[in-house]
Image: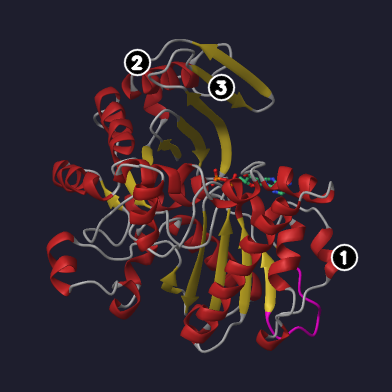
Amino acid sequence: MKILVINAGSSSLKYQLIDMTTENVIAKGAVERIGIVGSFLKQKVGDKEKVINKDLANHKEAITLVFCALVDKEFGAIQDMKEVDAVGHRVVHSGEDFNKTVLLNAEVMKICKKNIELAPLHMPANIAGIEACLEVMPNTPMGLVFDTAFHASLPKHAYMYGIKYEDYENYKIRKYGFHGTSHKYVSQNAIAYLKLEGKNSKIITCHLGNGSSISAVKNGVCMDTSMGFTPLAGVLMGTRSGDIDPAIIEFLTIKKNFTMQQAINYLNKECGVYGISGVSSDFRDLFTAMKEGNKRAKLALEMFAYQIKKYIGAYVAAMNGIDCLVFTAGIGENDDYIRSLVCKDMECFGIDIDLEENKMRKNSIRELNKPNSKTKVLIVPTNEELAIARETKALLQ
Ligand code: ADP
């Protein structure tokens, strides 16, 4: 069985074709600058890499180019798109309508369109990707895998905000959480690796990438998560502010003469570790700058680690304990400095990592904790594409 995974963003579209018998990636690629001058596709099949420069006005043209690249006689991976048994789409928001992966049909599409208002930056692109695929391969089953679905299990006292109850009822203003596919994948891998019984485990997962979120997973089920109504909430991130006092927004509109939209754009794109350091949103650049004596870069890294620590503390309290702390995604998997800051002075939670092991580079699941540390600390590489393909396969079976 071959499954094509599509992750459509506003101006980019990433894809992977996965052989589900072996779980090997047959082909992977990305189309960038869709709708902008200079669009191009980059595809990798085995060791062969191919770049196609072609102006692409929209997602349909991008998908059509992806299909051409996949079946190309010279640099493609398959002979015919009929070899693709199913497509798995990453969809950012399920609203309160879906708590798991669903098979696409007209009713599901209608609900996705209704939910555009919950994620106006992401949902239109996700839907454009789905519609483009539907036009080109109308008879191929498609699974929709939602970033929010794993968090559908949050208890009401965790997902409600302290606003008027009627505004939750009327407008569905509540915490949804994001990165759910990754939190689910790494928590399940941690449970399997540590041979913890899924039904009796307390895990905190730290997905630390350009966007970062922390989740509390008790007995295999998500109990709380740091992102909120939108992915702007939680810890500060590359360019996002994370949690702030909401009254700051009005203050910003006065002091900086911002419209509301400009204020939100500022909090999404100009803040976080980038805004604090004035250097970069990339943690490698921040570490280099700190080593060169840049105090604001050092502060940004310390703030990031401190905020993660506070979520860990909160989630230990929420679950009444912790068996395992998991680090994943670009920073979580690669940044030993951040991991060491987060785990420093956390003996009260039984967290005690081996600093030498923490510095090692390996691309597989592994333990960072000292042998007698009460709490396990793991690096679990995430693989959202494989998770989406597995969910889609399970749906078909
Ligand atoms: P996305 O949210 O876009 O999927 P990733 O999970 O790929 O992001 O994480 C990207 C971030 O990971 C980069 O911004 C960078 O800060 C960080 N990163 C990647 N490699 C390293 C590394 N070797 N050391 C420190 N940080 C890294």
Residue 62 in view here:
yes
Q: Amino acid at mark 3?
A: Lys
- Where residue 46 appears, x then y in whole percent? 65, 28
Q: Amino acid at mark 2?
A: Ala
Q: Classify 10 Å Cα crowding around label 1: few (below 14), some (14-19), many (20 and above).
A: few
Ligand 1 closer than 8 Å to the CB at disc 1? no
Which residue is label 3 attached to?
A: 42
- Please, what is the dominant secondary structure of the magenta stretch? loop
Q: Quadrant of residue 34?
A: top left
The boundaries of the magenta stretch are 368-375
Could you tell me which residue is drawn at 58 percent across and 83 percent down? Answer: 322
Going from N to C along the chain, the mark reached first, 2 or 1, is 2
Going from N to C along the chain, the mark reached first, 3 or 1, is 3
Q: Could you say whether the residue bearing mark 2 is in a helix, strand or loop?
A: loop
Q: Could you say whether the residue bearing mark 3 is in a helix, strand or loop?
A: strand
Which residue is label 1 attached to?
A: 356
- Where residue 212 appears, x then y in whole percent? 53, 56
Q: Amino acid at mark 1?
A: Glu
Which residue is label 2 attached to?
A: 57
Could you tell me which residue is drawn at 84 percent across and 68 percent down? Answer: 355
